[in-house]
Image: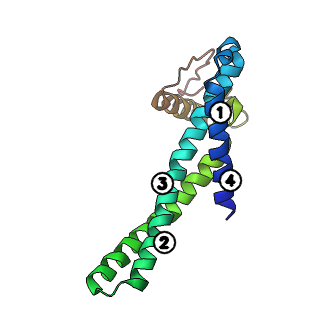
Amino acid sequence: MDLLKKLDDCAARYAEVQQLIMDPNLVKDPKKYKDTMRENVYLSEICSLYEEYKKILQGIKDATEMITAEDDQDMKEMAREELKELEERKPKLEEDIKLKLIPPDPLDEKNIMLEIRSAAGGDEASLFVRDLWEMYTHLAERKGWKTETMEAQETEVGGF
């Protein structure tokens, strides 16, 4: 499986990063320290998902073996229920892992400047720009981001 290979690689890299963190010289280089700690957090999240994934795969294997090897019908039924539950959780976890394997964008922690202008369209365009401004402002508030309106020119109808 390609996914398991990638997860094994991430686990190996996580072990390397753990060794780097223990190096006392790492603190002397602030940029390298920051980058290493960021990578450590990223890899630790992947590795925790990987551990959960391995448990699900092992549970599926164990339940399948129990269904084929067990003579007691009650035990077989319990194993079937467990197998069904594990197989339902597996695709969701695989999707979470695949999303987490996408490397974070280094620009995610940078500031942005957003300019919204009304172009052709008159009053309707200026009202639309106001709606966009409110939408982005509310999004920033929900995410806990700081916003600053540098300049806004209000129109007669209440738009920008």
- Write the residue at 45% across / 78% down: 65
Marks 4 & 1, CB-CB < 8 Å contact:
no
Label 2: how many Cα within 10 Å (few below 14, some 14–19, many 20+): few
Q: CA distance from mark 2 to mark 4?
A: 21 Å
User: Which x, y percent locates residue 105?
Assistant: 69, 36
The circle drawn on residue 121 is none
Whether residue 112 appears in this view of the structure is no
The extreme right residue here reads: 120
Q: Is residue 135 above or below residue 7?
A: above
Q: CA distance from mark 1 to mark 3?
A: 21 Å
Q: Quadrant of the N terminus?
A: bottom right
Give the labeled residue for mark 2: 61
Give the secondary structure at mark 4.
Answer: helix
Give the secondary structure at mark 1.
Answer: helix
User: Which x, y percent locates residue 158?
Assistant: 53, 26
Label 1: how many Cα within 10 Å (few below 14, some 14–19, many 20+): some
Q: CA distance from mark 3 to mark 4?
A: 15 Å
Q: Is residue 63 above or below residue 103?
A: below
Side of 132 where 63 appears, left or right? left
Indicate the amino acid at tag 4: Lys
Q: Tell which circle, 1 or 2, labels the residue nearer the N-terminal end.
A: 1
Q: Tell which circle, 2 or 4, labels the residue nearer the N-terminal end.
A: 4
- Write the residue at 40% across / 82% down: 67
Give the labeled residue for mark 4: 6
Give the secondary structure at mark 3.
Answer: helix
Give the secondary structure at mark 2.
Answer: helix
Give the labeled residue for mark 3: 52
Indicate the amino acid at tag 2: Lys
